Amino acid sequence: MQAGAVGIVVEPRLEFISRSPDRFWTVFAPLQWRGDSPVRGLERADRELAVDYADEGSLRVRATSDQSAAIDARTALQAPVFSHLNSFTRVSITGHRRLGLRFSPCPEVVVEVIHFDYPFGAPARFAYLDAGGTFLVVQASDAEKGPFTTLGEGRLARGEPLSVVLVEKGESPPRELATIVFADWSRQLSTELSPTAGWGLPQNAFEFGLASNDPSSAAYLTLTLAGTSVGRGWDSVGHAAGSYTNRIEIRLPPSR
């Protein structure tokens, strides 16, 4: 989707970057594979796109107006999958000058998207939902490792949509670029403790960052239901067999 100079690209299907065949560290797995499912059928209309996949998953995209779009992605897992790195949704954002995020559970805070180092160095920023229903936006101490400092927090009930407003902090006053609503993330995520993050953090995460130290470089948002990207180690955690639903709405502000 295009919002003036700002481009927003959404990858809404559940994707596994590294899997474990035996629930052990994925670094010892024979292969690291993405597990993409081939396309079985594709239909394109004026304002709609429909894709069906061989794994019984599907993708539907519909322009609901000139300023909004709706995405409905389904991914079917025939058996449990244990993974270290995966994504429930990935969003790429370009064309901004200095990007900030405003999360619906803590709308009074606009968190700037920054670059972080790996495996050591400049700290990462990300958010998560804990077992008590508190949504927290935090900053790590060293790369993606703890202890973690809270930047914002608020309540997010299970099944409640999570809205994220993209804000152009490079303008005065800051301007809203777009709102992205994730309808299903909180309902399906795991709040079990992460084996890698420590400090009482769960397996779910909403990670965000920049491609480089340049504040105008490409930004990314990565939502996971259960993964171990944060912290030390290559432990794998599981997704149960079944169908995963990912409904997303993107809304642009009214044209000036």
Image (tube, rainbow, N blue to C red):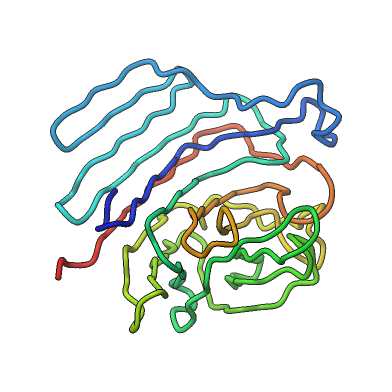
Where is residue 17 drawn, in percent x and y? 64, 34
Q: Residue at x 36, y 79 (%)?
A: 174
**Foreground of the two, 136 or 134:** 136
State how many labels appear. Answer: 0
Against 179, residue 249 (above or below) is above
In x, y percent, where is residue 93? 42, 53
Query: Which quadrant of the view contains residue 61?
Result: top left
Q: Quadrant of the C terminus?
A: bottom left
* Residue at 40% across, 45% down: 10
Residue most toward the front? 214
144 sits to left or right of 195: left
Judged left or right of residue 29, residue 132 is left
Q: What residue is shown at x 72% (from left), y 56% (from top)?
A: 192
Please identify the quarter of the rendering in which residue 238 is found. top right
x and y percentages locating residue 164 in the rendered image:
42, 65
Q: Observer-nearest residue: 98 or 181?
A: 98
In depth, the one of 177 and 150 nearer the eye is: 177
Q: Is residue 48 left or right of residue 20?
A: left
**Which residue is rendered at x = 76% and y = 22% of the image?**
31
Residue 126 is situated, as x and y percent measured from the top left of the image, at 61, 64
**Left or right of 249, for residue 55:** right
Q: Is residue 106 above or below residue 128?
A: below
